[in-house]
Amino acid sequence: MNILVTGGLGYIGSHTVVELIENNYEVIIIDNLSNSELFILDNIKKITGVKPKFYNEDLLDLNKTNEVINKHDIDGVIHFAAFKSVSESIKYPLKYYRNNLLSLINILRSMDENNISNIVFSSSCTVYGQPDKLPVSENAPFKKAESPYSKSKQISEQIIEDFVNSNDNISSISLRYFNPVGAHDSGMIGELPIGIPDNLVPYITQTAAGIRDELSVFGNDYNTSDGTAIRDYIHVVDLAKAHLMAIKRLNNSKKKNIFEFFNVGKGTGFSVMDVINSFEKINNIKLKYSFKDRRDGDIEEIYSDVTKSKNILKWQAEKNLDDMMSSAWKWQKYLK
Ligand code: NAD
Ligand code: UD1
């Protein structure tokens, strides 16, 4: 079975490509290397023994996208390609709307023209904003998006829903990721943050590696057990496996015209201090950190209700926080 993976050299895409290859899928990647590097392709080969077909093309070019798709008999698409920095999206909203929305529209058009039915889409828990109830389930309404990035995910899900409603041949599953962290056990693929990381775990690993002087813990006066904010961290390998379950579900379904969405989290909240303590303990490293004011725009607490994913997608996370922190450090040491 041939699966087109857009953004397949990126952080989550590359881990999903590995899982697909290990489950005997043929993988075709389109990635314009705007936020990834070619050595990841070689490392996928080192891990799996297979070098997937790779096209360095921009999805904003519909003709080129069609050319790639025409060359292969594609059975399904997993669409990762997008820009993902919340802070950058606030600075450059048009850049974000253009890339994230037009690449999706082009993929959907190309699927339609080439008679491809199934797409798995990378969404985010950010579509919920600050939810009223925890754990947050898929029934929670979309709140006002806090950034153009978040809005691009809300709009993308709506574009897909409208397209599925208008076209009997299209089916889709959106996966709403919570906080993906960690790396492959081999330590040869992982997240490549550009510049100074915004996210907690790359900041921790870069501090441990001596690239950053000190980690700032944003806020220790939240209404949580240790005062630091709570998130639902999910190991990227567990997350990659959810994509396999989603593409299988679409490809095996007798029902046509599916539009579904699932939370992909661990279902457990960890505080910033839980993450730091786990990193220090499992890697036997003392981390330099200090408490600072809360970061603008941060919410106090969010974690997922994963009942629907367990029951319908037949998926649940297996790896624990220590696995996330040990693999993240292994990857950082590989990069260093
Ligand atoms: P990433 O930046 O590592 O990977 C995205 C890949 O897409 C990159 O390799 C980039 O070069 C490629 N790309 C971007 N625009 C493209 C275009 N126009 N044409 C071709 N290739 C293009 O990001 P990631 O962390 O792997 O995230 C993957 C998806 O998951 C994104 O849609 C992101 O918004 C979503 N997501 C990520 C997180 C997270 O924390 N990493 C959380 C929730 C949702
Ligand atoms: C951010 C994005 C979210 C995206 C997610 C991907 C925002 C507002 N949200 O979520 O859309 O899906 O990344 O993983 O940017 N922290 C520190 N020190 C740091 C960095 C972070 O204390 O140097 C704290 C934060 O205040 C937060 C927690 O660590 O409480 C997690 O932060 P981060 O990794 O940036 O993720 P989110 O803010 O949850």
Image: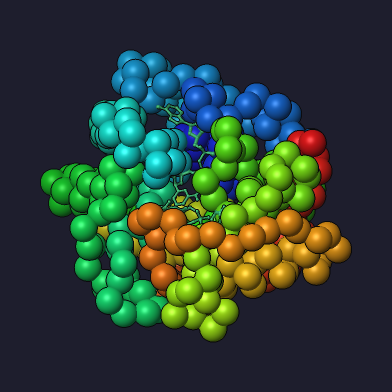
Residue at 27% in and 58% down: 259
Asked if residue 24 is positioned above or below residue 325 in the image, the reply reads above
* Residue 327 in picture, x, y percent from top left: 74, 55
**Going by the picture, which residue comes out furthest to the bottom?**
225
**Going by the picture, which residue comes out furthest to the right?**
284
Left or right, residue 309 beside residue 156: right
Please name whichever residue, 35 or 67, is drawn nearer the observer in this view of the structure: 35
Please name whichever residue, 146 or 245, is drawn nearer the observer in this view of the structure: 146
Asked if residue 5 is positioned above or below residue 255 in the image, the reply reads above
* Residue 177 in picture, x, y percent from top left: 45, 58
Residue at 63% in and 26% down: 37
Asked if residue 86 is positioned above or below residue 29 in the image, the reply reads below
Q: Quadrant of the C terminus?
A: top right
Please give the count of numbered marks on the rendered protein: 0
Q: Is residue 22 visible?
A: no
* Residue 212 in picture, x, y percent from top left: 69, 42
Q: Is residue 35 visible?
A: yes
* Residue 86 in picture, x, y percent from top left: 39, 44
Left or right, residue 210 beside residue 244: right
Please name whichever residue, 112 or 158, is drawn nearer the observer in this view of the structure: 158
Which quadrant would residue 99 be assigned to in this image?
top left
Which quadrant would residue 124 be assigned to in this image?
bottom left
**Going by the picture, which residue comes out furthest to the left?**
166
Q: How is the image coloured?
A: rainbow
Please name whichever residue, 308 or 210, is drawn nearer the observer in this view of the structure: 210
Residue at 30% in and 62% down: 129
